[in-house]
Amino acid sequence: MGSLLALGLLACGGPKGFVIQGEVTGLPDSTQLFLINIENGTLMDSAWVMGDCFQLEGFFEAEPQSVRMDARVNGKEIREWYQSMVIGNESITIKGDTSDFPTHLTVSGSKYQDQWTEFMSYRLASLRERDSLLVRILKLGDDPQQETEVKALMQQMSAIDRKADSLEENYLFTHPNTYPGLRCLSARMYTYSKDTVRMLFDQMSPDLQNRKYGKPIRTYIETESVSIGAPFLDFEAEDQQGNRVRLSDFVGKDGKYVLLDFTASGCGPCIQTNQAMRQMVNTYSDSLQIVSFSQDRSRETWLNSVQRDSIGWPFLWSAEEVDRGVVSVPYQVRGTPTFFVIDPQGKIVQKWSGYGKDIFDKKIGRLKNKP
């Protein structure tokens, strides 16, 4: 009876999902494929390859979605065999050979993937040209006699990057109400005025605006951005003990400066930064308070990194940050690690990104044991 009811629902026009039918030569029958939703990290479906063929199915509540198809042979992940796509609830066909992974498989049947292919064609074409120049540079090595040629090749690479950037920007301004347009604006929003971002964002459908990449754009439009010389922006988050705290709880206390560190558990330079900051705690105890803010999407991942890196200073995380970028967007954080120095009066006096040897001595060494 339940089966009959299910058939009845389907016959009456119930939700219809996506079907991916693939034929990729060179995939052994021991290959298992996994389809992962990139936006939320969930596993959508998995399938075994039989005679070069496979089928993956599922349903999206909102369209389109960024997905990635990974391959494992006898339980071992084959890193070269993957395919990223932007698809909806459509009938999709994938064809090609294992040598076509990850960018040359033919994906047909999805209007969203067609948009994404058009958008990415600019970048993929430039990457192929760029990679050929990079190979030539590496072959020349550090030979001083080849310095002139190396500089010329690097200038060609820069020109390629500028051209690709210009083509992508043109796509954004001519196709704003598309998923590629949304992704492009999300990546570029700090380079435009808020009026320009608002103009492009207003042309997008409500569905796009409320997607993972749309919510931070709205935050950027609706909040004041911080800058060097301006007052710090206060925010509330959870610390590693489970307490709700505010950044203002630390700013100006005992006349100390605050080093605000935007970090992530999977970032190699961030791990090096944590090692250096563990040594700084005593050296700067009279003048500096460190406060780290995690960019990890998972609370569990953040808490695990607290233990792994032996964090002994306030380390904060916020679910609202994960959803809307309520902290990193006003601070215009483009990567990790990124640091801000806030003086005892609450003014931002320094900002920099990246980690290198002796970076803290160079940037804030004057604060050592400062009265």
Image (cartoon, grey):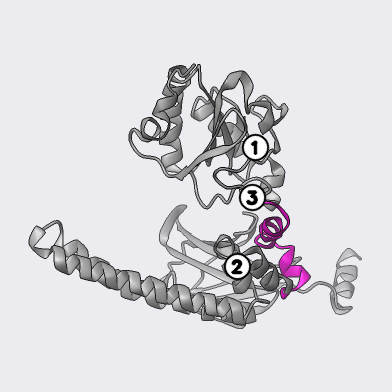
Is label 3 in a helix, a strand or a loop? loop
In this image, 303 relative to 245: left or right?
left
Q: Is residue 339 above or below residue 14?
A: above
Quarter of the rendering occupied by the N terminus? bottom right
From the top left corner, tell me how far across and down residue 316 is, in percent: 63, 34
Q: Earlier in the sequence, mark 2 or mark 1?
A: 2
Is label 1 in a helix, a strand or a loop? loop
Tell me whether circle 1 and circle 3 mark residues in contact (CB < 8 Å). Answer: no
The amino acid at mark 2 is Leu
Residue 210 sits inside the magenta stretch: yes
The residue sitting at 71% across, 62% down in the picture is: 211
Tell me, yes or no, if residue 145 can be seen here. yes
Q: Quadrant of residue 275?
A: top left
From the top left corner, tell me how far across and down residue 342 is, in percent: 56, 34
Q: Which of marks 3 and 2 is nearer the N terminus?
A: 2
The residue sitting at 56% across, 76% down in the picture is: 116
Q: Which mark is residue 330?
A: 3
Q: Which residues lie in the magenta part?
A: 203-225
Q: Kindly report the distance in space between the C-alpha atoms of the residues bearing marks 2 and 1.
A: 25 Å
Q: In this view, does 106 lie above or below 258?
A: below
Q: Nearer the viewer, residue 19 or 293?
A: 293
Residue 260 sits inside the magenta stretch: no
Q: Which mark is residue 185?
A: 2
Tell me whether circle 3 and circle 2 mark residues in contact (CB < 8 Å). Answer: no
Q: Can you identify the residue that label 1 sits on?
A: 317
Q: Which of marks 1 and 3 is nearer the N terminus?
A: 1
- Of tags 3 and 2, the one toward the viewer is 3
